[in-house]
Amino acid sequence: MANPLAEPLNPLVHEPAPLRNKIMNSLRRAIETGALEPGTRLVEKDLCERLNVSRTSLREALRQLQAEGILTDLNNRGLTVAAVTRSDAENIYRIRGVLEPLIVEQFIENAPDDEVQALKAQSEVLKKAYRGSNAEEIVAAKRDFYDRICTGARNPIAFDLLKKLTLMTSPLRRRSVVRPERQSQSISEIDTIVAAIVKRDKAAAKAAAEKHVANSAISAFRTADGV
Amino acid sequence: MANPLAEPLNPLVHEPAPLRNKIMNSLRRAIETGALEPGTRLVEKDLCERLNVSRTSLREALRQLQAEGILTDLNNRGLTVAAVTRSDAENIYRIRGVLEPLIVEQFIENAPDDEVQALKAQSEVLKKAYRGSNAEEIVAAKRDFYDRICTGARNPIAFDLLKKLTLMTSPLRRRSVVRPERQSQSISEIDTIVAAIVKRDKAAAKAAAEKHVANSAISAFRTADGV
DNA sequence: GATCACAAGTCTGTCATACAAACAAACTCG
DNA sequence: CGAGTTTGTTTGTATGACAGACTTGTGATC
């Protein structure tokens, strides 16, 4: 490196990204994408070999994921990918149903106009993704949209919680996004939220956000129930 | 618990309580009580000696506490007890302001009558504690009260989140509980919540819970601001 | 005397290894 | 066929080692 022209004026934090973080990201991703299905037992030696890391580092990463709730502890028999029960999922959607309106409210309180405009622009991107393209792009655009709202809300703690909660239900959600009738519904819901945000109408935005979560839940459960 | 005799026949799970869990509890307690103040650097070798454990186990416990957010990571310089900023604390209270009403709502939905009665009884204990006794007992009674509501709500995930959030602000709260004017206020707020729960009046209970959180926040910040 | 450079010490990040205890599966013997 | 025993696997814990990052103290230079 040491070439100042490569990265013009970045912070250059020299982030070494400890190995355990890479491990965590790798496992998280695997769970998110379904490569590791709920219930899968995580055997340390296997993972060490597959990831080519030492048991020490692996175990530290596992402890961290365990604390995040996406891995559960069989009594003395190691860890498995958390299998979210129906009741758990319902509870998670209940929580999101109050957290996301809060985030939206705080976005309206704290985000300057240019962020509002950027959000609106991103919502257009998301809409296009919903219409035209594959699941990958939808997920990416949706994540970006969420990120904007959450960072604009200036509540990193709630952001963090939401990320963990949505990750927990990723097995459910992975299936429900692709349902076409949900897509058009989702588009209009997001439009409603954004419109309310642009007007800085807290009550309307919160109501729309809550409804959006509720409908996501319905759709996810309908998919899960095999309808 | 309707039948006190049901207790003696517990599963007796023979919980070995891995060392790292004991370490976590010990550290959590130390943070909760203020023995470890925010900003304190946690040096692994020191802690190993003080707790008489190996670095391996200690580090796993630290990773878990880090994931819970009560320890923060200085870039390459180890961990410190998280110093909750003013803004963080405000955000935490905002989150609690939506989570606790949710819990109360779910308690009303899911708790059978005997749990409602038990909750009411515990609220009396709490009131007595507020009036008569030392801070220790108040905290214990309050924790018990909270536990009953949260378990009655059948939402262990929200329970977990709340525990972590309140732990994060424990430095603030440790001071504000003892303020006498807050005590009488708190008593009447809890009375209101319990009364609404007994009537199974969701709207009233949620409003009371939200107000309770808001007032706790005000009191905590007033204390923190040195008024 | 101030500053810069370098050296020593400290602490974390990572690894390899080892062994006890818990558990599961296979196996043996009645 | 069934009960107890053996064996292998996996986690829990400890120890020792070493590289790299950061801190601090020291000395050389101007």
Image: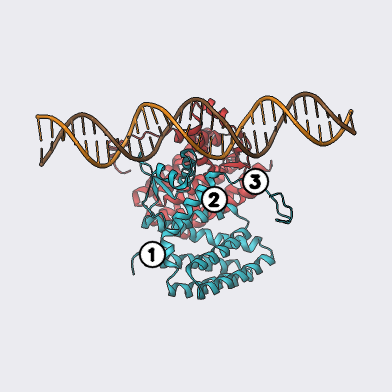
Chain colours: A cyan, B red, C orange, D brown
- Residue A107 location, quadrant: bottom right
Give the amino acid type for the residue marked by disc 1 in the picture. Phe
Left/right of residue B121 with respect to residue B223 in the rendered view = left
The secondary structure type at the circle numbered 3 is loop
Amino acid type indicated by mark 2: His
Distance of label 3 from label 1 (alpha carbons): 39 Å
Determine whether the residue tagged by mark 2 lies in a helix, strand or loop. helix
Q: Position of residue B159 (x, y in %)?
A: 45, 48
Q: CA distance from mark 3 to mark 2?
A: 22 Å
Q: CA gap, disc 2 to disc 1?
A: 34 Å
Give the foreground label among 3 and 2: 3
Residue at 38% of width from left, 64% of height from top?
A221
Residue closer to the observer: B107 or A28? A28
Q: Position of residue D28 (x, y in %)?
A: 83, 27
Q: Report the residue marked by disc 2.
A: B212
What's the mark number on residue B85?
3
Disc 2: which chain?
B
Dot 3 falls on which chain?
A: B
Quick one: A125 or B15, which is closer to the camera? A125
- The residue that label 1 is drawn on is A221
